[in-house]
Amino acid sequence: MPLPHSPAAVPPPRTDLPPVREITLAGEGITLSGLLAEPVSSTPRALLVALHGGGMRAGYFHGQADPATSLLTLAASCGYTALALDRPGYGRSAAQLPEGMGLSEQTHQLRAALRGYRLNNPCGGGVLLVGHSLGGKAALHTASRWTDGGLLGVDVSGIGDRWAGAARQFADQGRRISHRMHWGPLSLYPPGTFLLANALIAPIPEREAREIPDWPRLYPEVARDVRVPVRFTFAEHEQWWRSDPPTVRAMLARLGSPLSLSERLAGAGHNISLGLAARTYHLRILAFLEECLTLAEAGAR
């Protein structure tokens, strides 16, 4: 993922927020790395699992340019455990999987890793999957094959089911992509974002990249098997996906979900969780998580 030049200074870290630590989880024959934040003084209300997009890593959800952009610390401060995983082919597993994995195979690994984590740690009322871009596709894939119980919902951003403008040609041909396709206007991000984001960037594994053009064809098959609430967020300056009302209504109708929602987030580019609108978006994720908890509790009565 290309980064624009940014000469802005990096702010000093804050020490008054819930700690975020590195973690490893065992998949099926591979080890996944990630970042974990837990409530300081209470058992978690739920487990939020965040999956990054293509060419990024788990740190996407723990932005360093402005503490307000971290989904992990915000979720932990609100009483949830937040786990951001490096998807298979990224982070610790990159050496084991030099060509990466397709999304279907990633689903198997993610479910295995989360099953192990849930067996050994309190997770409150269940699991919310959060995904950005390619991680949103992985989240929907994982939800469509979830058989372990306790899945509350799925919250995704940076994906749709119909390419916007020239995005299809970029996806098909693997052409060099302007940073504006990924980021939108640079003024949407805190000072220091692009300098610090260098630590988040990773190559998109080959097998994952080969599947990118297939998503509009695969989405209906995946969507019909998702049986939990789903929320989509489209950034105002999203360049990859169509988000006009008729397209979004048709996309939501393909889900097998009891509840499906969509939002358009003003003042945001594709990489929402690193931008100035990140806190707004993350608070809405947590509000959706609370709604999912309420629905699950009502269904259990």
Image (cartoon, rainbow, N blue to C red):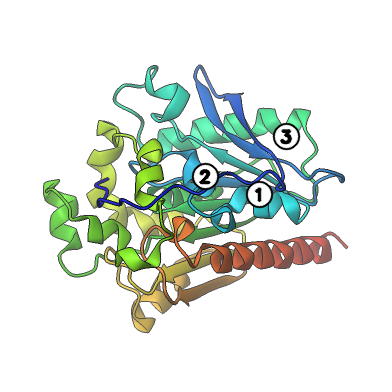
Q: CA distance from mark 3 to mark 2?
A: 16 Å
**SS at badge 2:** helix
* Res. 56 visible in picture: yes
Residue at 49% in and 39% down: 58
* Circle 2 residues within 10 Å: few <14, some 14–19, many ≥20: many
- Give x and y (percent) for residue 38: 74, 41
Residue type for callout 3: Arg
- Mark toward the start of the polypeptide (2 vs 1): 1
Question: Contact (CB < 8 A) between labels 2 and 1?
Answer: no
Q: Which residue is mark 1?
A: 73
**SS at badge 3:** helix
Question: Contact (CB < 8 A) between labels 3 and 1?
Answer: no
| Residue 151 in the figure: left or right of residue 65 | right
- Give x and y (percent) for residue 293: 76, 61
- Give x and y (percent) for residue 145: 54, 44
For residue 142, the mark is 2
| Residue 246 in the figure: left or right of residue 110 | left
Which image quarter is the N terminus in?
top left
Question: As rendered, which of 190 and 57 lies closer to the eye?
Answer: 190
Which image quarter is the C terminus in?
bottom right
Mark 3 or 2, which is nearer the eye? 3
Residue type for callout 1: Thr
Residue type for callout 2: Thr
For residue 118, the mark is 3
Placement of 172 over or under 279, stated as above or below: above
* Circle 1 residues within 10 Å: few <14, some 14–19, many ≥20: many
Mark 2 or 1, which is nearer the eye? 1
- Mark toward the start of the polypeptide (3 vs 1): 1
Residue at 35% in and 67% down: 187
- Mark toward the start of the polypeptide (3 vs 2): 3
